[in-house]
Amino acid sequence: MSKRLPWKPNDVSAVATRVSPGEPPPVSDGCAPRPPAARPVFEARALTKTYHMGDVEVPALRAVDLDLCRGELVVILGASGSGKSTLLNILGGLDTPTSGHVRFSDHDLATADAVALTTFRREHVGFVFQFYNLIPSLTARENVQLVTDIADSPMRPEEALALVGLGERLDFFPAQLSGGEQQRVAIARDRQAA
Ligand SMILES: Nc1ncnc2c1ncn2[C@@H]1O[C@H](COP(=O)(O)OP(=O)(O)O)[C@@H](O)[C@H]1O
Ligand SMILES: [Mg+2]
C-alpha cells in the first residue's frame, strides 16, 4: 500500500509506503484506524528547508505535509537529492527547518533549541546511519557501551549485541567486521537509545 504525499522535494515526487501487516486499508488521513482521540505522533506542516551555498539557495524541502502514526513502519522513497535525509534529519532532531511546523508528540521540533533537541534525541530517537558511524578505535562492545552510558534504562551491550547475532564478535573492531556486521552493531547501539 502506498500513498503519494503532497510534497514537492526538488520537483521529484516522493512516495511514503506504510507497511501494516494484517491491518485494513488506511482511513483518509493516511493513518491506520485508531481511536478518535489519538493523533499522529509526528506531524509536519508546510515544512521547508533551504540550504545556502554562498549566494546560491538550495531548496531541499518545499512545503512538506506529513503525518506518522505510532507503530507504523514507513518507507520514504525518492530520487537521490530529493530531500529524504534532510527530512529525516529534521524528524530526528538533528536539524531544524527553515520554516513550517513539525512536532513529535508534545515536542515542538521546529523551535526547539540545541539542548531540547539533544534531550529529544536521547529519549526518543534511534538512528541507524547509512555509513554506520562507528568509532574505529573502539570494539563492538565499546561502541554500544558509549550509548549505554547515557541511555535511561539500557540493556547490557553484550545482550544488545547478542540480539543482532554478534555475541561472538564483542571484541572485534569495526575494521574486522563486514559491512553488514557493522550495520548490526549500529542497530544494537540504536536499541540502547530508543
Ligand atoms: N548541508 C547542505 N548544504 C547544502 N545543500 C545541501 C546540504 N545537504 C543537502 N543539500 C542539498 O539538498 C538536497 C537534498 O539533499 P538530501 O536530503 O541529502 O537528499 P537525499 O537524502 O534524498 O538524497 C540536495 O540537492 C543536496 O545537494
Ligand atoms: Mg540521503
Image (spheres, rainbow, N blue to C red):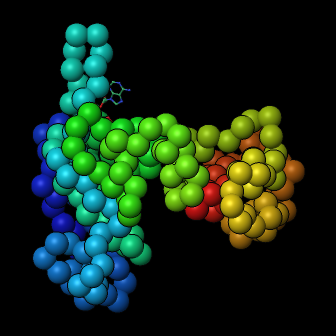
Question: Which residue extends farthest top?
Answer: 55
Question: Quadrant where the N terminus lies?
Answer: bottom left
At x 74% / y 43%, what residue is drawn? 174
At x 71% / y 51%, what residue is drawn? 150
Q: Is residue 67 visible?
A: yes
Question: Which residue extends farthest right?
Answer: 171
Q: Nearer the viewer, residue 177 or 144?
A: 144
Q: Quadrant of residue 33?
A: bottom left
Q: Check the image and report above or below for 163 versus 50.
A: below
Q: Quadrant of residue 86?
A: top left
Side of 191 where 68 appears, left or right: left
At x 55% / y 49%, what residue is drawn? 119
Ligand 1 located in image quadrant: top left
Q: Check the image and report above or below for 56 versus 67.
A: above
The image shows residue 107 at horizontal and vertical percentages of: 40, 55
Q: Is residue 12 visible?
A: no
The image shows residue 44 at horizontal and vertical percentages of: 25, 54
Total numbered labels placed on residues in the image: 0
At x 17% / y 47%, what residue is drawn? 46
Side of 13 where 34 appears, left or right: right
The image shows residue 78 at horizontal and vertical percentages of: 26, 49
